[in-house]
Image (cartoon, rainbow, N blue to C red):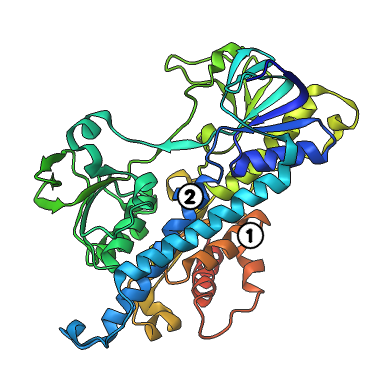
Amino acid sequence: MTSETIHVDVAVIGAGTAGMHAFSTAHRAGADTVLIDQGPLGTSCARVGCMPSKAVLHAGKRWSTLQSLLPQGASAQLPAGHTTPQQLWQQALAVRDELVDGNVRNVHQLAGERLLQASARFVAPDTLALSDGRKVQARAFVVATGSQAVRPAGLQAELGQALITTDELFYLPQLPRSVAVMGLGAIGLEMGLALSRLGVQVAAAGRSPVLAKISDPEVAQAATDYFSQQLPLALSEAQITVHRDGDGVLMQAGPLRHRAQYLLAALGRKPRWQGLDIAQAGVQLDDKGRPHLEADSLRCAGSQVFVAGDVSAHRALMHEAGHEGTLAAQQALRALGDGDWKNLPERHRTVPMSIVFSDPDIAEVGTRFDQLPEDVVIGTVRGPGSGRSKLMQAPHHILRLYAQRSSGRLLGASLMCAGGEHLAHQLAWAVQRKETVNTMLELPYYHPSMEEMIDTALREMRRSLRKA
């Protein structure tokens, strides 16, 4: 332990995606910067989020594809030495471990000696006390401490180790025999499908009437119709009860009853503020003890503290965390008012985009359906109207495009289709570049491709605009 005090321009707390971007931005601008993290190092995305979930989804797709190609009831005829679901599970976790190791190396390479591995708490508006006895005095702070899975205390007391979140799921050495999923947002749907496709007995329940918070009612209905054939679902259930049942759990939601080895609580994530003593930084708090955040600047009102990433509870996505880390560091440097820092180029927010890798993918970009203006035209294409969807025997595919009627400018989209992650990116780029129905129709659309769904929807919209 040491009583050393470190004096810097900017202190970044949290070495996840947002923190790394914040540190890099401030450091490259010439600011004396430290990066503080209590460990374990490695982003939430790499350890328990987007990367292991996609690895398990890929494993599930491989196993379910094999099963679908076998004659009915032929699973016992698989050749000796074939890959098993357990082996696919272990391969997915090995990929995760490799990614985490690479991520940890990147943190050390980025920050070097400026990485302080300790927990931190505010003891004054300009001072942090570290768990190793040192203090950090800074002119500005970026808090990027991320989020943690919601874990209801009552369920934890009732179920003990039978209650897991993705924080524990991806560290189970053995593929579970059975899982009950509570919560049908993006993570609940993805993991329910992935585990089911790996042969795990899965049932899922959620209080929302729609899957993955889809705002467009036609896409939401298409998703419910399709995925309810993939695994037992209970939606819009006001009462979901879970009890200990022997060494497992019993989940009941309406007519759904499911006994399982584990309950996977997929109830979202909450900002990680505990232990920071953020009030000591002069931050103004609301009646629930949360900092008042200035949305444009990411600044905590009344302080020199800026926030970025999941802790801001704005858009809890990796690419958004990176953008916010850069933006928060730029705003912190501007607040210092030194020299060229006042004139730093501003990083602007990108068009909103969310993707559920459910295969077929669900995606929403730009303006959500429930936020559309009255002056709107909508183009809809379903699987039977798409050549590529017909070839794939996928009548469940659906794409909905939104445009402003007065100008024809593209506003957003909602979709469910194979390869939807790629369509979502193309449409998000088009919205951000302020493309119109007519300018989009000037672009090439190869036949037969999923992109032709965009062309078909645009042509329907052009007809509507001409009538208007």
Alpha-carbon neighbours of circle 1 within 10 Å: few (<14), some, or many (≥20)? some
Quadrant of residue 54 in the image?
Answer: bottom left
Residue 142, given in percent of the width and then of the height, sits at 65, 29
**Which residue is labeled 2 in the image?**
47
Left or right: residue 187 versus residue 335 is: left
**Can you say whether 392 is above or below 415 in the image?**
below
Residue at image coords 53%, 67%: 423
Dot label at residue 429:
1
For label 2, the SS is: helix
Residue 200, given in percent of the width and then of the height, sits at 23, 63
Amino acid residing under circle 2: Arg
Query: Can you see residue 203?
Result: no
Residue at image coords 27%, 80%: 67
Residue at image coords 57%, 62%: 425
Quadrant of residue 296 in the image?
Answer: top right
In the foreground, 23 or 136: 136
Alpha-carbon neighbours of circle 2 within 10 Å: few (<14), some, or many (≥20)? many
In the foreground, 95 or 332: 95
Left or right: residue 163 versus residue 465 is: left
Residue 465, given in percent of the width and then of the height, sits at 55, 63
Per the model, the C-alpha gap separating discs 2 and 1 is 29 Å
Left or right: residue 194 versus residue 27 is: left
In the foreground, 369 or 324: 324
Amino acid residing under circle 1: Trp
Give the mark nearest the N terminus, 2 or 1.
Answer: 2
For discs 2 and 1, the disc positioned in front in the rendered view: 2
Q: Are marks 2 and 1 in contact (CB under 8 Å)?
A: no
Residue at image coords 32%, 45%: 266
**Can you say whether 317 is above or below 343 in the image?**
below
